[in-house]
Image (spheres, rainbow, N blue to C red):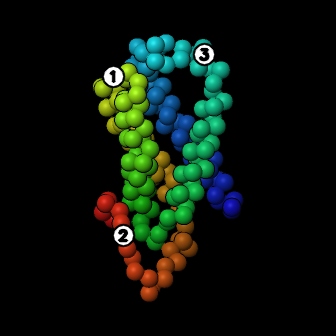
Amino acid sequence: MSKRFWISVVVMFVAAMACDFVVHGVLLGRDYAALTPRLFRAEADAQAYFPFMLLAHAFMAIGITWLYRGGRSARPWAGQGVRFGLALAFYAVVPTYLIYFAVQPTPGALVAKQVVFGTIAAVILGLVAAAVNRDPLVASRDDDAVDEDLSPIPR
């Protein structure tokens, strides 16, 4: 793995932590406070588990970087970033909150906010991944290869 890969991991870690702080700490903080301690840990208790939050975001940063770098193409980076962010949301954000809604007593309005804000954050992370990993030399495409696009999202 190259130096650029690890730079991307660090940038993605910071971006993911920032997005999650804004979404969960700022935008949804009051919603979560209303469900504490019935559904969520109290702030003092949660602090003891913060190392797990850091570890989770490190895994996210590595995974996002790895997936994005493996699928880059010669197309404009911003479009690739938006598509990648939407793919992250469809794979992780939306299903996660729907599953939580099915198994724990989370209010529907909160789940809707989590899905919307989480999807916006995923698109931002996709754009950051695309911006950090822009590389004009990536576009080595075989001219004889068939470009089969299975994405439901238009390029």
Work out whether 29 lies above or below 135.
above
Q: Amino acid at mark 1?
A: Pro
Under circle 2, the secondary element is loop
Q: Quadrant of the C terminus?
A: bottom left
Q: Position of residue 102 (x, y in %)?
A: 36, 30
Pointer 2 residue: 149
**Mark 1 Cα shell of 10 Å, populated few (<14), some (14-19), many (≥20):** few
Q: Is residue 49 visible?
A: yes
**Mark 3 Cα shell of 10 Å, populated few (<14), some (14-19), many (≥20):** few
Quarter-of-image position of residue 154: bottom left
Residues marked 3 and 1 touching at CB (< 8 Å)? no
Residue drawn at x 30%, y 26% is: 108
Q: Position of residue 91 (x, y in %)?
A: 42, 48
Residue drawn at x 38%, y 21% is: 105
Under circle 3, the secondary element is helix
Residues marked 2 and 1 touching at CB (< 8 Å)? no
Pointer 3 residue: 45
Front residue of 132/29: it is: 29
**Mark 2 Cα shell of 10 Å, populated few (<14), some (14-19), many (≥20):** few
Q: Amino acid at mark 2?
A: Asp
Front residue of 85/52: it is: 52
